[in-house]
Image (cartoon, helix red, strand yellow):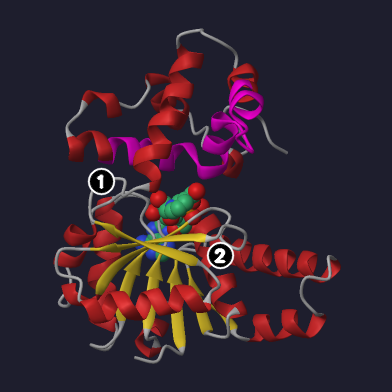
Amino acid sequence: MEIRNVMVVGAGQMGSGIAQVCAQAGYQVFLHDKNEQALEKGMQHIERLLEKAVQKERISPADKDETLQRLTAAKQVDAAASCDVVIEAVVENMEVKTKVFQELARITPAHTILASNTSSLPITEIAAVTNRPEKVIGMHFMNPVPVMQLVEIIKGLQTSDETFETIKKMADTLGKTSVEVNDFPGFVANRVLMPLINEAIYAVYEGVASVEDVDTVMKLGMNHPMGPLTLADFIGLDTCLSIMEVMHDGLGDSKYRPCPLLRKYVSAGWLGKKSGRGFYQYE
Ligand code: NAD
């Protein structure tokens, strides 16, 4: 199947990054968010990143202009009707995602592949609310999308081989390396990463060491490019909490219980970099 038009639903940090790489790869892209301010912010973020890339001579000014021409801010989700692939990147919440998928299945033609950028939620369950589970798939990009190489491609129970092959090829055209993953809570990336982040939060919660010192241990002691608490702030603490909850519920093992300090920060609205405050404070 040839892919020409792509819609990305959710213009937050992930959705805007996905829209950017799709437009840079030559697809016609609609970026949609139900929140107009978020949509505007997402579009501005893309423009800023492209401008930076021009300044660093990674792309030409013409590349930037052509990329922006291929990108449309869609206030209404109805623009999905002309799309061959829709990639959903709304908040990590099953109720919200299933509503979005029900609507997308209603709006889009039968050939449209519906992909989710979920970090941890079951693709099989998301697919089950649509009229075409064979065309529903997980396409899990890493943050920040324009920089990170990996895409986990997750096959739900009923995802067809044809859908998998189409999405794998699409990931190739985006310049990404993909891995095939089966549908289990947290997939691979977050099943391994999130318990590490959660344990780092426990170390702070139990007074083992300060936020800065926990990060220093992992950076200088383990050669991680950034500490786990900085990384948690970048991912979003609400997203981290949702992923831990999905793994705790789905795998039923107490080792996945979210740290109470993580819950406390999220209930205070300290969501990390995107809200200006998490384990660290941001401008
Ligand atoms: P975010 O909070 O930055 O953005 C989410 C956006 O979705 C918001 O702009 C919000 O207005 C919009 N939204 C919410 N409900 C909507 C709806 N019904 N229709 C349209 N838009 C809607 O979140 P994010 O960090 O970009 O995460 C998005 C998804 O990507 C989540 O499923 C998350 O688990 C996943 N993900 C996140 C990361 C990360 O590092 N943050 C990495 C990989 C995957």
Q: Position of residue 21 (x, y in %)?
A: 57, 72
- Location of the C terminus by quadrant is top right
Q: Secondary structure at mark 1?
A: loop
Q: Is residue 36 visible?
A: no
Res 60 label? none
Is residue 274 something that shows in the picture?
A: yes
The quadrant in which the N terminus is found is: bottom left
Q: Choose between 275 and 117: the one closer to the eye.
A: 117
- Residue 79 placement, left or right of 45: left
Whether the residue under disc 2 has CB within 8 Å of ligand 1: yes
Rendered image quadrant of residue 251: top left
**Quarter-wise, where is residue 212 in the image?**
top right
Residue at the extreme top of the image, as rendered: 207
Q: Is residue 119 above or below residue 89?
A: above
Based on the picture, tell me whether residue 233 belongs to the magenta stretch. yes
Residue interval drawn in magenta: 217-246
Give the residue at x 51% y 44%.
235
Residue under label 2: 16
Amino acid identity at mark 2: Ser
Q: Nearer the viewer, mark 2 or mark 1?
A: 1
Residue 185: assigned label: 1
Reply above or below: 263 against 57: above
The residue that appears at 78% across and 70% down in the rendered structure is 58
Q: Give the x, y percent position of residue 89.
A: 42, 61
